[in-house]
Structure formats: structure tokens, C-alpha cells
Image (spheres, rainbow, N blue to C red):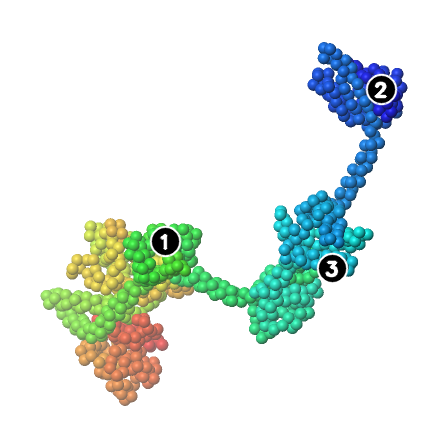
Amino acid sequence: FYDLPFIGMAITSPLTKQWLHVNQTLCDILGYSREELFAKSWADLTHPDDLAADVNAFDRCIRGETQGYTREKRYIRKDGTLIHASVDVRAERAADGTVARFFSTIADVTERNRSEQALRETSELLANLSKQIPGVIYQFRLFPDGHSCFPFASEHLWEIYEVTPEEVREDASIVFSRLHPEDLAMVTASIAESARTMEPWHAECRVVLPEQGVRWRSGIARPERLDDGSILWHGFISDITDRKVAEEELLRRDAAMAASLNGIALANLEGNLTYVNRAFLELWGFRDASEVLGRRAVEFWDRPEDAAAVVDAIVSGANYSGEMTARRVDRTKRILQLNAGLFADAKGKPLGMLATFIDVTARKEAEEALRLRDRAVATSQNAIVICDAHGVIVYTNAAFVHMHGYDSADEIVGLTTANLLSPEDLRRTRPLIVEQGNWQGEVRAIRKDGTTFDALLSANVMLDADGQVLNLMGSLVDLTESKRLQSQFVQAQKMESVGRLAGGVAHDFNNLLTVMRGYLDMALSDMPSSDPLGRDLLEVSRAVDSAASLTQQLLAFSRRQITNPQVMDLNEMVTRMQGMLRRLVGENVELRASLAPDLGVVRFDVNQSEQVLVNLAVNARDAMPDGGQLMIESANVTLDDADARAWPGVVPGDYVMLAVTDTGTGISADARAHLFEPFYTTKAPGRGTGLGLAMVHGAVAQANGRMEVYSEPGHGTTFKLYLPRLRDAVPVAVPELADALPTGDETIMLVEDDDGIRTLATRLLKRQGYQVLAFGSGSDALDAAGSLSSPVDLVLTDVVMPKMNGRELAGRLLQIWPTVGVLFASGYTENVIVHHGVLKEGLAFLPKPYSLATLARRVREVLDRSKLA
């Protein structure tokens, strides 16, 4: 026991773990003497990292779970060095089953472990080297009888052929079975050729592997002929699948570039073309690549200076995407979409520039046409709306938004046509539009605030490729202004008709009234006031005044009344007429005036202004049968663009406003619509002619003014007149009339084609003391003027006469007598001495029918004025 060489032996106590007996070999292994070992336990010399496992195995034996254990552990020698030992421990048990003692053998395996570790490290090194090589290092042996094997192959053989080195060490047939059927003959032939020539073998082929599928392999080997006649190849096989795929991809890419419909060009970093495909040549109109290769890329732009910055940016590493204008060989221009950038090698080093070109000329033209259509639709004055097949609105232009009173299209998009058309129109029109494909007609449209207006709708259906309704498009025209203008046109036609009627009768009618009034004036002036016949003649005179007023109202309404506008102060006119107005409206109507102290002046016919105020006061009185208040107001106002939009025809600017307000019965909406029409009246039969307001409207319009009416039934009525305000103008004073009629002794040439008026006017003038030369035509008067020894003082001529009118006669006579006074008389002038009904400046006018007093005063006024001149 104690003399066994190389094996340490010991008996240890199960209680103290101390050695009870050891041999010399163990002492030599641990470096202690027997006495020193007897003083220690095996636990004292066990390496701390191994102690726990040792104690655990020891305890299991004590508990009877095992009879012993074998393990490797480390001991700490006396000199502090470590040894590796193989320990085998066995328990000897007493009769009661407890452990009496342990028998142990300890072998020093330090050197063995070192050798094994060195071997492992060498193997790991070789294995790692083999792993670092991307392929298989192998030996392939071919015997004379055709048998082959792989005497050696590295572990990567599995990755290459999906076989292990052990499977092919004696037989290589499994490797050949992995070769692609189409490549097998080529590989075997190349091996045979290498064996014949003893030249190195090389082949690239495909393999079909159970797991990896088809892969590419590249093999190279150098042959060696052995003594037994076999040939041993020492070689290397690698996977070249990625390279082959890349090559195939490159070939496909080259083919794709060549066949691409987009133009493709490559250039070096200096900007010279190195490759172009067929599409590039076609874009620029070249026939062969030799015409362009080597040329500068910038030459192919219409403006090379535009290209320089782009090329510089690309060379600096930036990608470019944008449009360019190309100049073809035939000098035509095309718009191309250009995408360009650098291409680099595997290490990222730039090799050159790659650019692709797409001809977008047609697209750009189409886009521009589409943009033009979009702008046309968006800016169209017609309101345009598009909705889907269910009537949901998807688009509106600005005109539509404005027409319907919305702030933006966002408020309308998403609504349905039910929000914009009256229900009855929607039910009526939608089936017709869908059925017919298009439709046009009038509808009632709805604004945002709920109000409605008349519109002309032109609608059509937009179909998809299958003929199904995709959208409905509508174009609306607001008919409000059109209908207003139509109404104005109808009104103008009425005015024209009435004007023609008035003009037709005014001349002859006023001539008759002039004769009637003149003889009535003379008869009344010669008749004693006590004569009962005088009262009857006064009634006839009033009837003549009424007839004359009716004619004047017809002419005023149709704007054919001759006016003599003057700079006037409306406040002065209202103040002057208040006394008469109080008598006119009666005691049960309170008349009040609120006049602006700084009121501006206007240009208006003084007589017309009085007629306007009287007519409005009379209407107000009739609207207040039980009494009320009549308020006359004046003010300076300014009408802006908003007022102009609300009142078509109004020019923005400064105005004088005259308002007449009553507290009467008011006017209904229907009546307001016809208020200024001739012969329209709401009064009882016999109480109104229907010409009063028509005359007012015509007179104000003739003065470039405007009238507005505000009224509600039961809440009274306000008429507002707006007349343009003049600046830096002084009103003309209204002369006070003397009680006595003026007389004179001057010579007057009277020219009148109507015998009755000529006779009457001669008598009236002679009554006032004048010398009268009367003629029935202009030619007679002109002939007589040449034979007169002295000029006359005044020419009183009718305006409308056959052959030679009064204006022409006056012009001829003024050539003979430059200082002679001229007074024109007429009831209707046909624009001979007027312009749009306004008396031409500097002309004196006597309107028919005239009275003795009017004739006397007007003749004296013209005579006095001509003498001052």
C-alpha cells in the first residue's frame, strides 16, 4: 500500500477529515512529511474553490447515499504551488452501517492536464483558423480504378456540400451527387483533364443542397501523383453564390438600363459622359452613343449655365431632383424630370454620376392646362359647385361662396344640396339632371342666413369609366340683378312709351292750353270781381292748371320735362314752403322740420324741387286720414362702396339727403314694388292719378339722384332723396315776384307756327306795351329780318316748328343781330335746346302753357339781361 509508485495513498478519519495513514508518494506529491500531514486534514490542503464540492461528496458518503466518489481537484502544496490530482475515495463501514474510515488514492495529473490543455489550445487554434477561411480546405484522391474520396476536409465541408468530413473520408460519391445536373459533366471532365495534364484544376459550378437549395461553388486545387498511381489534389472550395447573384443582378441591371424607357446616363467625376442608354439618345434625337460619349454633361441643357450649379452640387455629394429644359438636335425644347446623384464602389468611394431623365413635356402642358382650368373655375364669376353622387358638396369656387353668403368654402364642403336649394326645386331638378345628363333652368337658391334668391342653374352629370354617376356639377348665376335690370328695362320701356305718348301730345296739348289760359287771364283781368261769371272762369282756369300739371308730370316721369337746374339750398326751399305745406296737409297733421345747419348745396330745378316736396307731402297727408306727424329732415351723408353694392347705379361720394316721414298707414311690400310706376295708385278712384311719385322719381333721377323708400304697414313711411352734394358753389337766390306785371316798349319778333298762340301772344305782349312783329315760320321771320331798318330787341320763338326749328332760327338771327335777346317757348322740345331734358346753359326758356303773368315777367327778364350784356 505504501510502496505503490506515482500513486499517493491515505486513510482518513470520517470525523475529523485528518489523515490517519499516508504513503511516501503522497508526501512527495504534497511536499509534506508524514508527521506534518498527520497534523492536517485533507480539507486544509484543498483549494478553496474545490472544497465545497469535496465536502458535499464527503457528506453524501457519511449519510450513506454513496459508497465513495471520484473527482479531480486541486491541492495546495507546502510551497504554495497548486497541483491537479485525481482522487478516488471509498468508505469502509462498521457493522452498524456507519463509516469507520475512508481509503483514498491520489494521483498527480498536473502534467497530463497541461498536455491536454496544450492539445486543446492547438486544436482550437486550427479550428479557429479553419473557421476564418471562407471555404473548405481539402484533399481529394482519385484512384486508378475511378474510386475517389476526401482523405481530409475541414469542418466547413458541411456548409459547402451539407456532408461531414467523416462521410466522404472513404467515398466522395455523395459530393458528386450534390452537383447540379447541368454542371456535373463539366466538373468530371475538368477533373479528368487536370489528371491528364497535371495542371491545376479550377471550376465554377452549381450544387443542389437539401437545405440551402441551389448554390454556386468555386474550386481550385493542385494535383500530386502518388506512388500507387493515384492522384491527390490539395485544394480549396468556396461559396461564390453572392458573387454570382451580384453578377446576374448586374447583368439584369445593365439590360434594364439599356431597355429602360427613361433616359439614363453615367458620367465621371469630371462631368464627361461614359454611358447612355437608347432612351437617352431618343430624348435628345441622337442616333448612336458615339455621338455623345465623352462630351460634357452640361452641353445637353438648353442653358449650360443652369446645369453648372447642379453638376457642382452632385459632385459635392448632394442628390438632385428637379426639372431641366433640354435642347434636342433639331433645336426643339423639351422639359425633362432629372434625378441625379453619385454612385460609389463597395468602400463608398465615389466613382461617377448617375442621372435619369423622364420627358414630362406633355405632363407639364397638361398640368398647365389643368391649372388654367382650375384658375378659370376658381376665378369664374359664375358660381360653380361639385357634389358627389349622393349630393354631398365636395368643391365650390369663391363666387359660389360669396353668392350664398358664406365666409369660406370650408363652411360649404360637406353640406348637401338640400342646404342650398329649395326642397321643391331639389325634388324637381335632380331626377332630370341624372336622367338627361344635363339641365338648365331657374331655381330658388338658399343663402347661409336662410334667405332665398332666384338663380339660373346649369347642371351636368360626370360619369366614371363604368358609366355610373360620379359627380354632379352645377353653375349658378344670380338672377337678382338681372331681374332687377329686367324690371328696370320694363320700367324704362314703360317710361319710353309714356314719354312718347307725352311727347306726342305735349306739343299740341300745351299749345291748346296756352291759348285757353291766355284768353282766360285776359277775360278775368277785364272782368269786374263782382261778376258771377268770374267764379266760373276761375274753375275753368283751375282745370287748365290741372291739365297742364298732368302733362308736366307725364314729361317729368319719362324724363322729358325741360328742367333748368340751379345751385340751390334745400333748407331754404323747405323753409320757404312750410307755410304752404301747413295749409296743404291740414290742421290735424303736425308738420315738423329738422334741418342740418351745415347742409350742402345741390344742383336741382327749383320748380321741380317744390313739386317733389308738395307731392310727397300730399301723399303723406292722404296716408294719415286721422292725423299724425309729418317730419321733414335734411342731412349731409356719404355713400360708400357698400352702399353702391346695395344700391346698383349709385356712385360713391357725398350727397345731400332730404327725408319726408309720416306716421301713416304704411305701404305693403307688393305696393312698394310698383310705387314709382306710372298710373299706379293705392288711393280710391278719383283721388289720385298715379303720376305723383312717378314724377318725383323721374325728377330726382334726372338730377343724378336716388330715391329710397322705407315703410311697413301700420308703421308709417319714409321717402329719402339723395342728391349729389356740390363743393364751393353758391346757391342762386329765388327772386320775389312783384304784384304788378312788368311792361315795356321794346320791339319783339314773335315766331310761332300755331295761329291761335301767335294771335294770343301778340295781344298779350301788346297789352304790356311792346311792339310785336309776328311770323308763322322761321323762314318768314328770317326773310323779314333782312329788310328791317333796325334790329329788334327780343326774339320770342317756338322751338318745334316745321322746316326750321327755333334753335336754328335763333342762330341765324344772332348772326344778323349779335346782341339780340332770345326767348324760347315750347311745351316739348325733342332735345333741340336741351340735353337729356336739361336746358342748355345760357338759354332762356318759357314753358307752355304759360300765363299772362309768366309771359310778362319772362320777357322783361330776358330784355333786361340782354341790355346788361
**Residue 756, image quadrant:** bottom left
Q: Is 293 on the left or on the right of 726, as rendered?
A: right
Q: Which residue is mark 2?
A: 1
Q: Is residue 517 visible?
A: yes
Element type where label 2 sits in the image: loop
- Residue 246, how many percent across, how many down? 65, 56
Left or right, residue 123 beside residue 254:
right
Furthest residue in direction top, as rendered = 96
Q: How far, Cα to Cα, is label 1 from label 2? A: 113 Å
Q: Quadrant of the N terminus?
A: top right
Q: Callout 3: helix, strand or loop?
A: helix
Mark 1, other Cα within 10 Å: few <14 / some 14–19 / many ≥20: some
Q: Which residue is mark 1?
A: 391
Q: Amino acid at mark 2?
A: Phe
Residue 193, disc: 3
**Gap in angstroms between the C-alphas marked 3 and 2:** 70 Å
Question: Few, some or many C-alpha atoms within 10 Å of disc 2 (few <14, some 14-19, many ≥20)?
Answer: few
- Locate residue 808, reporting x and y percent: 30, 81
Q: Which mark is residue 470?
A: none
Q: Nearer the viewer, residue 572 or 630?
A: 630
Left or right of residue 818: residue 237: right
User: Along the polypeptide, which appears first: circle 1 or circle 2?
Assistant: 2
Looking at the image, tell me whether mark 3 or mark 1 is earlier in sequence order. 3
Quadrant in the rendering for residue 860: bottom left
User: How many neighbours does mark 3 have within 10 angstroms: few (below 14), some (14-19), or many (20 or more)?
Assistant: some
